[in-house]
Amino acid sequence: LDSLRQAMQGVKGVFVVQNYWEHLDPVMEFEQGRNVADACKEANILHLIYPSGEDVKLASRGRITGASHLDARAHVEKYIRSLHIPTTFIRLPFFMESFHTVL
């Protein structure tokens, strides 16, 4: 968190980039997103841009459980909203063909 605080000194806006595929850990994905959000709040960032995702498990009523990367980002989005940081949430497209290779 200290490195994020330092990086945000004098910054007006933040665009978040996370790489779930580097660690394949939804808990780590949430923690990274939460840390960025906390640092933004502390630094009084004017605007945050966060590439979020749909909570697939929730939206499918538990039928689809293999999209933890999206679920984790949806949980980060919920957390960011609770902090009342001015944020633009981006929902990048997911192609139907990916269901054959990803899920």
Image (spheres, grey):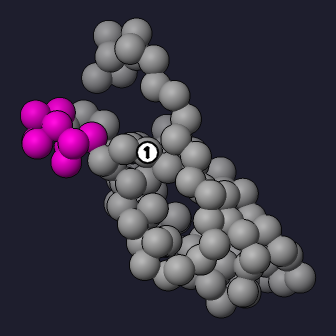
The residue drawn where x is 74% and y is 79% is 45
* Image: magenta residue range: 56-64
The residue drawn where x is 79% and y is 68% is 13
5 and 51: which is toward the camera: 51
**What residue would you read off at disc 1?**
53
**Rendered position, 37 above or below 58:** below
Q: Where is residue 42 in the image (x, y as percent from the top left)?
A: 65, 90
73 and 78: which is toward the camera: 78
The local secondary structure at tag 1 comes to loop
Say left or right for 14 vs 36.
right
Say left or right for 14 vs 26.
right
Is residue 57 part of the magenta span, yes or no? Answer: yes
Q: Position of residue 1 (x, y in %)?
A: 61, 80
Give the residue type at disc 1.
Answer: Gly
Is residue 86 part of the magenta span, yes or no? Answer: no
Say left or right for 10 vs 35.
right
Residue 21 seen in this snapshot: yes
Q: Position of residue 102 (x, y in %)?
A: 36, 21
The residue drawn where x is 63% and y is 72% is 86
The quarter in which the C terminus is drawn is top left
Residue 1 seen in this snapshot: no
Q: Where is residue 4 in the image (x, y as percent from the top left)?
A: 70, 76
75 and 35: which is toward the camera: 75
